[in-house]
């Protein structure tokens, strides 16, 4: 990968008429630098050339190595709405980057539901009385929010340093809706500038977002079949879209992907691939505590696919694999079961609530500025009490409730033959009691276990409970270490 970029850079320098002092595209005018942490500044110059960088009273210098590469770190800075300039000098060559802010910076990635562009909102027809942000692109006017769209074939160094822009039209129209609404919420709640980077490709699996070595470190993949498949599928988006961003200083990652990997027969395989991705990205950014917040793939009629052997229970099995990754430190999953209008749509349009939920998780878990639970109720434990199963949850917040006041829905009890039966459930002592009366030798409970399920169990803060089954072994089979 390094050889690939070195060759690419060589041809860029050889074919351009620009100076030999070169910066990666991610460093440019209008960018946001991460507050409260050392900030990486890097690039290329003549081998052995001294490079000077100045900003806000800081004066840093380093020397380009034998290949011309150089890197240094600015001291941590406080958030500020006052724009500053960065001056970079190497010999007779100089670059000045202007209109720079200091605040919070996040990277969002994944496939089409993360890539889903803001301009698509303008085409929506809200139902009567709905307050959908269809005019957001036209009305956005906040210079303290900055966006950077990673385009796979346009990450070469840019002599005009113009990759970043304010989150306004026309650039905002092509940007991730999830990423934008996440950034908007952070900006409003934290009252600091926010920079958001989007690197997403529709239809992409998880494998291309990391090199094969990231996965092959796991003993889970130590067989010839896995090795062959992984090497064939891995790396191409990491090399062209993620690696050029490293080591740009970040606060954390947002991930919305899984629709393509939902077809895996071995569900645990995806959990280990998530582990590989998270660990690899954290390692490359030299911070094994960087938050990784990800989105549960939305309910969809996968069972109606004509070319795959799917049932209505296949997607819940994948949700289970996604949930198992929560054993990895500093991860949070966002529920989407209540955010769909039509399970026939693989790309549900409600991206503002997804972005806001991701932001709420960050505000709770990363910034700790509110007491709201970081996500919806998550299955914790089950005990038997006569003819009832008593189920407890994490992330209950101020308490469990039926969001619509109706009896709790989508609870089922398994009998001794493995068949499931609809069951009544009530909230008692802030736990859910599932009645197994009439079921001979009841063995387990499952909840929301359909691809089109829209259960009404929520916490008081308005976040839906995640689907689960009490007899799952998948979580226990996954080793996060």
Image: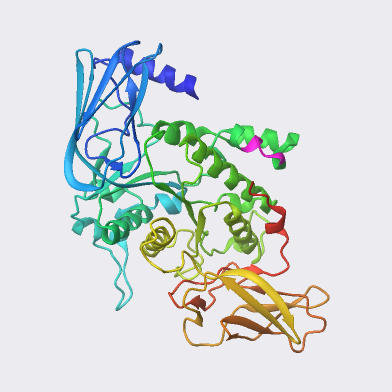
On the rendered structure, is 356 left or right of 332? left
Q: Position of residue 34 (x, y in %)?
A: 32, 43
Which image quadrant for residue 121? bottom left
**What residue is rendered at 66% in x and 60% in y?**
310
- The stretch of residues the image draws in magenta is 215-219
Magenta residue check for 300 = no
On the rendered structure, is 42 left or right of 374? left
Q: Where is residue 290 in the image (x, y as percent from the top left)?
A: 46, 46
Q: How many marks?
A: 0
Above/below status of 25 relative to 64: below
On the rendered structure, is 155 left or right of 312? left
**What residue is rendered at 30% in x and 78% in y?**
128
Front-most of 51 and 311? 51
Q: Is residue 382 shown to the viewer in this render? A: yes
Q: Is residue 98 shown to the viewer in this render? A: no
Magenta residue check for 217 = yes
**What residue is rendered at 79% in x and 73% in y?**
418
Above/below status of 408 relative to 262: below
| Predominant secondary structure, magenta span | helix
**What residue is rendered at 78% in x and 75% in y?**
443
């Amino acid at each position: 990968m390094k050889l690939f970029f070195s060759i690419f850079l060589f041809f860029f320098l050889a074919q351009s008429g620009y100076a030999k002092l070169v910066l990666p595209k991610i460093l440019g005018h209008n960018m946001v630098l991460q507050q409260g942490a050392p900030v990486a500044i890097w690039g290329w110059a003549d081998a052995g050339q001294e490079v000077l960088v100045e900003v806000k009273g800081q004066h840093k210098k380093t020397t380009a190595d034998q290949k011309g590469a150089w890197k240094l770190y600015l001291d941590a800075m406080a958030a500020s709405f006052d724009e500053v300039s960065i001056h970079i000098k190497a010999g007779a060559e100089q670059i000045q980057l202007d209109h720079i802010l200091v605040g919070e910076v996040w990277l969002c990635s994944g496939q089409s539901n993360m890539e889903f562009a803001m301009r698509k909102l303008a085409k929506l027809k809200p139902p009567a009385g709905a307050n959908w942000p269809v005019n957001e692109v036209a009305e956005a006017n906040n210079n303290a929010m900055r966006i950077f769209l990673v385009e796979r074939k346009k990450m070469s160094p840019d002599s005009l340093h113009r990759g970043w822009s304010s989150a306004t039209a026309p650039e905002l129209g092509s940007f991730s809706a999830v990423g934008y609404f996440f950034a908007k919420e952070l900006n409003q709640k934290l009252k600091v500038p926010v920079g958001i980077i989007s690197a997403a490709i529709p239809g992409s699996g998880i494998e291309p977002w990391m090199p094969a070595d990231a996965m092959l470190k796991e003993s889970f993949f130590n067989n010839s079949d896995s090795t062959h498949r992984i090497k064939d599928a891995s790396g191409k988006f990491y090399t062209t879209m993620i690696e050029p961003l490293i080591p740009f200083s970040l606060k954390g990652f947002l991930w919305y992907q899984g629709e393509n990997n939902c077809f895996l027969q071995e569900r645990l395989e995806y959990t280990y691939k998530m582990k590989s991705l998270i660990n690899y990205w954290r390692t490359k950014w030299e911070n094994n505590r960087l938050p990784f917040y990800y989105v549960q793939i939305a309910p969809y009629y996968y069972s109606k696919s004509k070319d795959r052997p799917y049932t209505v229970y296949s997607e819940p099995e994948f949700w289970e694999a996604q949930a198992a990754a929560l054993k990895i430190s500093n991860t949070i999953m966002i529920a989407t079961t209540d955010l769909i209008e039509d399970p026939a749509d693989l790309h549900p349009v409600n991206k503002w609530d997804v972005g806001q939920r991701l932001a709420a998780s960050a505000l709770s878990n990363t910034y700790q500025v509110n007491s709201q639970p970081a996500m919806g109720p998550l299955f914790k434990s089950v005990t038997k009490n006569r003819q009832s199963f008593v189920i407890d949850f994490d992330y209950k917040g101020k308490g469990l409730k039926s969001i619509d006041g109706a009896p709790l829905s989508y609870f089922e009890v398994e009998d001794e033959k493995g068949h499931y039966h609809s069951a009544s459930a009530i909230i008692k002592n802030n736990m859910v009691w599932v009645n197994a009366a009439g079921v001979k030798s009841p063995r387990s409970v499952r909840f929301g276990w359909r691809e089109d399920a829209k259960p009404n169990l929520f916490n008081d803060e308005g976040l839906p409970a995640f689907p689960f089954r009490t007899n799952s072994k998948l979580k226990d089979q996954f080793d996060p270490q």
